[in-house]
Image (tube, helix red, strand yellow):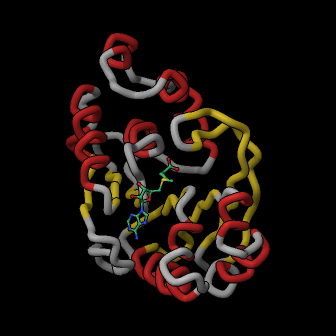
Amino acid sequence: MMNNIRRSALASLEYSTDAKTWLQGKGERFIRKLGITEGQSILDFGCRIGHYVIPTAVVVGPTGRVFALDKDHDSLDFLIKNAKKLDLDNHIIPIKTTGELNIPLEDDCIDVVLLYDIIHIIIGIDGTLKPLQLLLTELSRVLKSGGLLSISISEGHLREVNYTKQDIIDEINKIFTYRNLFKEEIMHWDWLLIGQVDNFFLA
Ligand SMILES: C[S@@+](CC[C@H](N)C(=O)[O-])C[C@H]1O[C@@H](n2cnc3c(N)ncnc32)[C@H](O)[C@@H]1O
């Protein structure tokens, strides 16, 4: 069941050295630890070049779907170019937006939302928690009941917009229920580091 990304295919990817290490197995182990399984539908909101999309696509397999949403269309094109080399592009669905917080997906169709390293950017839209509230409401609409919302926040980035991690957790707890915290080796931008991921579920 372990990683099925072939070493030869991995070598052809245009990702950083750390990202290739991540794709060799750490990424897939992390995604499985979240509870993601074969056949599920996952939304990665603000996925950039797909450091989480690729291992998620491996785990959900051809019967699953990974919706890769970003307003940076070049990043999504780069992701799909790499996904093609891994034969993963048939179940990765890029969603190119212009930064709007409404999501072009129907209600109750997603098992897990990944919201990694983007919350400070959402707050930065107007400096208040309002855009985050709008996004969380939208995420709760597309998530199935019992679905998971997994977030990572850089406390340094949050200080830049004058909020604390507790402020964000309090906001999320208005709609979701806190589940647990993982301290894990994760990808942050193009580097591997020990980071924190907080998980919530939709009751
Ligand atoms: C710091 S990167 C994080 C990428 C990825 N989640 C990760 O952890 O590797 C933030 C990404 O969010 C995207 N983004 C920011 N605001 C967005 C919005 N309103 N709608 C869609 N994408 C957005 C950016 O274009 C960028 O690709």
The residue lying toward the viewer, choosing from 21 and 40, is: 21
Left or right, 1 with respect to 166, comes to left
- Quadrant of residue 168 within the rendered picture: bottom right
Residue at figure coordinates x 46%, y 73% from the top left: 144
Left or right, 170 with respect to 143, comes to right
Q: Residue furthest front?
A: 160
Image location of residue 17, percent across then percent down: 50, 21
Residue at figure coordinates x 48%, y 47% from the top left: 37
Image location of residue 86, percent across then percent down: 28, 27
Image location of residue 177, percent across then percent down: 69, 76
Up the image or down, 147 lies above or below 30; here it is: below
Left or right, 102 with respect to 156, comes to left
Up the image or down, 65 lies above or below 102; here it is: above
Q: Residue furthest top?
A: 8
Image location of residue 124, percent across then percent down: 54, 74
Does any portion of residue 67 appear in the rendered image?
Answer: no
Query: Taking the image as four quarters, which one is ligand 1 found in?
Result: bottom left
Up the image or down, 179 lies above or below 138; here it is: above
Residue at figure coordinates x 38%, y 58% from the top left: 41
Does any portion of residue 107 appear in the rendered image?
Answer: yes
